[in-house]
Image (cartoon, rainbow, N blue to C red):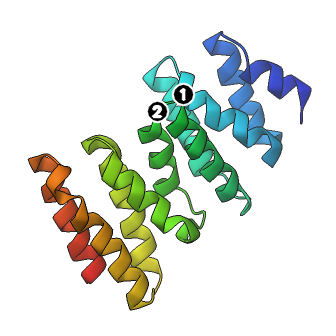
Amino acid sequence: MNKEIQKLLNSSKIEEIEKGLKLVRKKGKIQELPLVCNLLNNSQTESLEAQIIDLISNFKDKKGNEIIVQSISEIRKQKGNLRAILQACWQSQLDFRQHLALFTEIFIESDYNVSLEAFTIIENIWMDNEYENSHRELLIDSIKDNLGEMDEPKTILAKELILVLEG
């Protein structure tokens, strides 16, 4: 890991973090990706959050998806900014199809805004890939089983997701 990048990304000063993000964009390696993802939990401004999301979204190393999924797990445990990292997922070109069940679980458990981001990921995965009917039915049943626990706006969103999955 690049020590200069690590120092900048761990800074409490926005200017230094932004400088670190620029360095990651220029010469960063996959080792810096967890630090970048972790910044979403602590992003102090919308501008900084947007820069982080953009960097993650444009990450090209195919191994990045596993690091991002690990970061999602950490953010879930810490009750952090899940919406932002999910936004980076659906904007990226990385393959998250192996984690479709995780995104469905997040959709079910989360508030409307986070669920909307998870919906977009699921929809993108579903539109790009063919799945066995048994897998489809498990996802649909999981969502249907939880409809009673959702408020009205999220229930409407869940029914839309079911239509996507049935489509």
Q: Label 1: few (<14), some or many (≥20) within 10 Å? A: some
In the depicted structure, whether residue 111 falls above or below residue 118: above
Q: Work out whether residue 90 or residue 133 is closer to the camera in this orientation and state it.
A: 133
In this figure, which residue is indicated by the disc labeled 1? 41
Mark 2 near mark 1, Cβ–Cβ under 8 Å? yes
Q: Which mark is residue 82?
A: none
Badge 1 marks a residue whose secondary structure is helix
Whole-percent x, y for residue 12 in the image = 66, 10
Whole-percent x, y for residue 126 in the image = 40, 76
Label 1 amino acid?
A: Asn
Label 2 amino acid?
A: Asn
Structural distance between the alpha carbons of marks 2 and 1: 5 Å
Q: Work out whether residue 78 or residue 12 is closer to the camera in this orientation and state it.
A: 78
Identify the residue at horizontal 54%, vertical 65% (top origin): 99
Say which label, 2 or 1, has the lower sequence index: 1
* Corner quadrant of residue 52: top right
Identify the residue at horizontal 89%, vertical 36% (top origin): 1
Q: Which mark is residue 81?
A: 2
Q: Label 2: few (<14), some or many (≥20) within 10 Å? A: some
| Residue 96 visible somewhere in the drawing | yes
Left or right: residue 106 versus residue 21 is left
In the depicted structure, whether residue 86 falls above or below residue 143: above
Whole-percent x, y for residue 25 in the image = 72, 40
